[in-house]
Amino acid sequence: MIRSFARLAPRMAHGNSLFSRAAAHLASAFTVTVLAAPLLVAATFSTPGLAMEPIRTSGTVLPLPKPDFVLSLPSEPVLMTLPVARPDLNDILPKSTATISEMVALQTGQQSTREDTYKLKSGEGLATLLVRAGFTKDDTAAAITEIVGRASLRALPIGLEVRATEHGFAFTTKNGRDVYAIRDPEQGWIAFTAIRPVERYVAYAQGVIEDSIYRAASQSDIPDAALAEYIRVMGFSVDFQREVRGGDAFELLYEQAVDGITGALVETRLHYAGLMLSGKQLGYYRFDHEGSRVGWYDRDGNSAARTLIRTPISGARLSSSYGMRKHPISGYNRMHKGVDFAARTGTPIIAAGSGVIMKSGWLGSYGRYVKIRHNSTYSTAYAHMSRIANGITPGARVAQGEVIGYVGSSGRSTGPHLHYEIIVNNRKVNPMTVSLPTGEKIPPELLDVFEERVELVEAEVAATGSLHFAAMDLLPSDLAAE
Ligand SMILES: [Zn+2]
């Protein structure tokens, strides 16, 4: 499968300059395809049960549907709780224009002779800035009266850019909307909010790992945010520093929202993460539950999240594995009932899973030690810390990924490292090989919606002509390798 993968020629995007440029300097082993496909975008923003767009595979650049940009912002929760669906703000609010002059002409028919940008200085309010921009005190007062209620004028950030002509001005609020104030020759000052046009693109990237995923990804222009989420999602199942080998391959499908006026990146969202290791294929799909929670699941709806993280420390080297070894201090052969990760003193150690702190403090040869009980079956323990994090005291609850302490060499230890144990039914097991259960599954009532989402992602990937390796059905012969 890897062999045929290597035959893939670099594929160029259809006509979109942003991604064409990105795709142009890709290494030959690498492919990024940008689709002008509205499928996923439509699905992402539509409510479950609404009809989906038909699948399009033509290379024509189609106009993108206008998703409700406001709903994509986490700071805008208000619209979700109303009993009656509100009309889309995009249908109510006007669209921002590239310049103030354009909006002035559109709204009042007046022509502007100048257009300048003023930055809000430290200690300055909007009124002072407007006077500096040449408006009279009366105009300033009238304009501000109209704006109050559309933007919090007390919370304007220093450096805010206010764009002005002699007939009006505008600025962008932190939730990405534009507030305009324009002087109409008949009505006087009017103020309104406009929505900045956002263009969404779905991009697909795949590559073969030569030494590390980080290097492969950095050669490929995959956005940092998409890569970080990819590593996090895969990190439950794969140890990128130890399990990934040369020739392994990865793929991502991600979406980017770009401000239609400035071209600035507004948002990056990973939709699909795939990885093909020797003998193991993993494919995870993003799924937004009702509300704000995002989960990652395989195509059967099993969570990508594991109950426990195998490597609760980043950037560390496995310095001693589980099993019989000659003890570094006593020199006797002894069973090493954990794994050691060598890392610099002070490297943060995270909770491998959510749970309750059972022990926290000095414990003989373990030095500074923390033990977490995750459920009736699983516990984890962490030893030799230089410091235990604040609040990590017996009885405290911790969330998976929360920092519980820092690497050190306390107790019976020859150098800074984390000694990590996974305890199953009171028995210490090998953290690297113990099979760990996955987190929750997709609730049965949401499975249909999830399956539609999976099909959309797969249609997107298939439309690139790529081998869709990580999520495709395995042949019995492939399974034999596991
Ligand atoms: Zn150890």
Image (cartoon, rainbow, N blue to C red):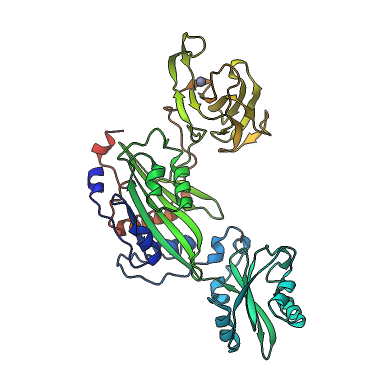
Vertical position of residue 14 compared to residue 137: above or below:
above
Q: Residue at x 59, y 82 (%)?
A: 114
Vertical position of residue 71 compared to residue 334: above or below:
below
Q: How many marks?
A: 0
Q: Which residue is most to the bottom?
A: 186
One can see residue 303 in this view: no
The quarter of the image holding the N terminus is top left
Front-most of 369 and 399?
369
Q: Residue at x 39, y 44 (%)?
A: 215
Relative image position of residue 471 (x, y in whole percent): 34, 47
Front-most of 182 and 428?
182
One can see residue 260 in this view: yes
Vertical position of residue 277 compared to residue 340: above or below:
below
Is 474 placed left or right of 157 in the picture?
Answer: left
Q: Which of the 4 image quarters holds residue 481?
A: top left
Q: Residue at x 38, y 34 (%)?
A: 243
Q: Which of the 4 image quarters holds residue 178?
A: bottom right
The quarter of the image holding the C terminus is top left
Is 80 placed left or right of 323 in the picture?
Answer: right
Relative image position of residue 401 (x, y in whole percent): 56, 38
Relative image position of residue 418 (x, y in whole percent): 53, 26
Relative image position of residue 90 (x, y in whole percent): 54, 72
Is 11 placed left or right of 182 in the picture?
Answer: left
